[in-house]
Amino acid sequence: MIDGILLLASAGVSFALTALLGLWLIPLLRRLKYGQTILEEGPAWHRSKAGTPVMGGLLFIIGMTVALVFGVCMAAVQKDNRLYAELTSGFSQHRVAVWRLVAGYALALCSGFIGFMDDYIKVVKKQNLGLTVRQKTMLQLLAAAAFLATLLLLGDTTTHIPFVGLVDTTRGAGLLYWPVALLFIYGFINSVNLTDGVDGLCTSVTLVVAVFFLLASGLLALSCLGLLAAAAAGGCAGFLVWNCKPAKVFMGDTGSLFLGGLVCAMAFATGWPVLLLPAGVVYLCEALSDILQVAWYKKTHRRIFRMAPIHHHFEMLGWSENKIVLVFSLVAAVGCCVAGLLLKIG
């Protein structure tokens, strides 16, 4: 009972703080003229969004971080709860689970900082391309490598794979886990970034994914994961107050790269990172559509989709932004159900 109250309180604090901070931060961003620049190759009707404040991801980054600190403090005061037991577990089975989350949230914050630098260069320095692809790639790979190295040093040397079981990542074919995990994290962080192209889309899809990991935390008896997932869900819901169509603020790379790191953190915290493949099916489709479009165009000078990533394809077909958000969120929910089934049957 106490653990449930802790999770609800964390989600509530994250929601309220994220939503209320918008009353102060959005006008500030407008006064600073930190507005979005709409690229020429994007949909023509998106040009009306030019000037909408960007860097709005700071809202939920602050909201989630405060909610996490609040949840931990509340658990420490109450003491008679599973969360406190996990946090003070020392060298028990929960130690690795707790440190996965600590390292994972650090990954999310580092990713958000990379996004902030990119946004700052774009909107403050007025250099539309922001960080170069090489700069962003190197920084993201460095952050991902530091995260994985931390897990290895803390003794996190196994991973669950559905229908296979527990795999030792320190011997034989299991050693492939580390380079694959590096590319996995890098790919998903940027896939989440690509999903941020329609009002409320990335926020809504990530809200669905966060709710899945909240439920998964119950199945796995990982209260620390539940706390993070609850804060993530509350923060995303709070941001939708300002980000649903018509968006009053955009999360920018500050927010989308942070959310990319966050979903990776939650996936690795379960010990079943592969679950992010079905749970993050929308992110995958966004990335694959972009990759296929570029590769096919270079080869044939023809397009597979009317525009990529794929949410723009549906815009070009006449779908409203609200319809895209609804359908993509439902697809994410189906993917999460598949992930839950895999987790249940092991």
Image (cartoon, rainbow, N blue to C red):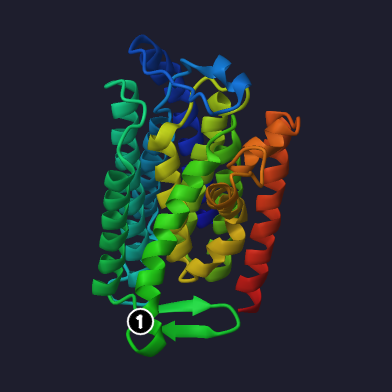
Q: Determine whether, in the image, residue 339 is placed left or right of residue 169.
A: right
Q: Position of residue 4 (x, y in %)?
A: 54, 53
Q: Residue at x 61, y 56 (%)?
A: 281
Is residue 209 depicted above or below 243 in this figure? below
Task: Report the front residue among 49 and 302.
Answer: 302
Residue neighbourhood size for the residue with mark 1, other residues' Cα within 10 Å, grouped as few (<14), some (14–19), many (≥20): some
Determine whether the residue tagged by mark 1 lies in a helix, strand or loop.
Answer: helix
Quarter where residue 204 is shown? top right
Q: Position of residue 1 (x, y in %)?
A: 56, 56
Quarter where residue 30 is shown? top left
Is residue 170 in sight in this rendering? yes
Number of numbered markers: 1
Is residue 152 depicted above or below 255 in this figure? below
Q: Determine whether, in the image, residue 246 is placed left or right of residue 85.
A: right
Task: Report the front residue among 210 and 290.
Answer: 290
Which residue is most to the top? 31
Q: Position of residue 231 (x, y in %)?
A: 47, 45
Quarter where residue 147 is shown? bottom left
Is residue 194 depicted above or below 54 in this figure? below
Quadrant, the C terminus: bottom right
Task: Report the front residue among 287 and 104.
Answer: 287
Q: Position of residue 239 (x, y in %)?
A: 52, 31
Which residue is most to the front? 300
Q: Residue at x 42, y 37 (%)?
A: 255
Per the image, the residue denoted by label 1 is 175
Q: Residue at x 38, y 48 (%)?
A: 74
Q: Residue at x 33, y 71 (%)?
A: 95
Circle 1: residue type: Leu
Is residue 80 in sight in this rendering? no
